[in-house]
Image (spheres, grey):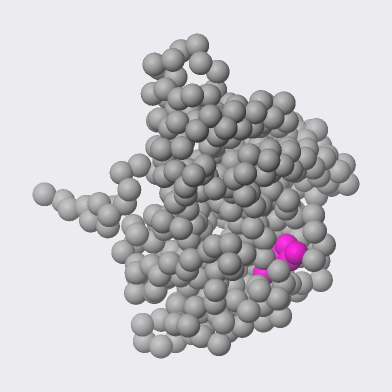
Amino acid sequence: MSSINDNYLSLEQRYLFVEVASRVAAFCQKNPSAEIIRMGIGDVTQPIAPAVAQAMHKAVEDCCHSETFHGYGPEPGYDFLREAIVANDYAGLGIKASEIFVSDGAKSDTGNIGDIFSADNVIGITDPVYPVYVDTNTMAGRRIVFIPCNRENGFTGDIPEERLDIVYLCYPNNPTGAVITKEKLKAWVDYALRNNSIIFYDAAYEAFIRDPKIPHSIYEIEGAKRCAIEFRSFSKTAGFTGIRCAFTVVPEELTALSADGREISLNQLWDRRQSCKFNGASYISQRGAEAVYSPEGKIQVKAVIDGYLQTASLIRESLEKAGLNPIGGENSPYIWAQTPGGMPSWDFFDLLLNKTGVVITPGAGFGQGGEGYFRVTAFNTKARSLEAMEKLTELVKSL
Ligand code: MLT
């Protein structure tokens, strides 16, 4: 008989958002007339920007004519998009188009990147954390060291004493909504350079940063090109959760060791991996992503994010009034708050769902460090979000 990858047996039975969805589905089945307000998974609700829609319509039209038809594209992405990314997101930071790898999502890239690293690497993961980093490294059988993130360290983790081969950082953070200062990010980069470690920097929420002092990219820090891979996504930036388009930056000077001690280019290795296992994001989604950088696209996309940020601010205010000590929601679509009376977070999730129909994400789903907390997303409409906060506040008062 064939055998399985036993590492899968160490995973939680279900992926976090599948568990959340299945509890909501069970509730809906029992209460078919109940009204649900979804503030759990970070899925956008506003339509794509008109400039993006127009570019995608045009791309569909291109594919309807033999002269402009597009079949397989280049695996790392079309030059038109790679160049637009460099010119707009990395102006002045010395990143080249050959260092941009367009993909179908930051979730898949942050998981798949492990393919080019040995299973012996020890992985540093901030806790609480986006569960994909933990699950994919568990699947590969890697040892994980958790770096506690709490109020004392601004939810940005203390720089470890020990050497870790790879550290995942995500800012603005999912789930806590915390941001990282340039000074703190520099401390992480210095740690990585000192220890020959690599940082996987997930910047999927950078478009929500409004504070000019907060870095958008790890490459704003001197030396980061020698120690960091950055992940970005159009999902939350431009409403692409269903359309799918993202990219990963692997600098050409970034290397890691082979078993026989040679320094190997990670850019070449990732290119090799992607060209074998991935056929590229669709021409249509890449044309849509390119339009995010057009003058109209920029204005339209920013307006949508501004709307989500206004909702985030109202949610934070309500949670503050309810005495739940929220953080985040200022440069992020996520607000992180304490459960009432320190209630276990899945208990609070179930209680809130059953009493009010409001769906949040329990902190424990993001790791041990999330116990006693819950996450609210600002992606629902302002009106629905306010209604949800009223219901939540009433429930908290009744406890
Ligand atoms: C979340 O809710 O944490 C996100 O939607 C996850 C993701 O983007 O995959």
Looking at the image, which residue is at 40% across and 30% down?
23
Depth check, front residue: 28 or 103: 28
- State yes or no: residue 28 in magenta: no
Residue 114: percent from the left, percent from the top? 43, 64
Magenta-drawn stretch, dominant element (helix, strand or loop)? loop
Residue 211: percent from the left, percent from the top? 80, 59
Looking at the image, which residue is at 72% across and 26% down?
383
Depth check, front residue: 168 or 328: 328
* Residue that lies at the very extreme toward the front in this rendered image: 398
* Residue that lies at the very extreme toward the top in this rendered image: 33
Position above or below: 161 against 358: below
Residue 321: percent from the left, percent from the top? 68, 40
Position above or below: 110 against 27: below
Q: Which of the 4 quarters of the picture holds residue 15?
A: top left
Looking at the image, which residue is at 41% across and 40% down?
346
| Residue 277 visible in the shown view | no
- State yes or no: residue 215 in magenta: yes
* Residue that lies at the very extreme toward the left in this rendered image: 1
Residue 2: percent from the left, percent from the top? 16, 51
| Residue 24 visible in the shown view | yes
Looking at the image, which residue is at 46% across and 13% down?
32
Position above or below: 35 against 40: above
Report whether 226 appears left or right of 82: left
Question: Which stretch is magenta?
Answer: 214-218
Depth check, front residue: 330 or 97: 330
Q: How many marks?
A: 0
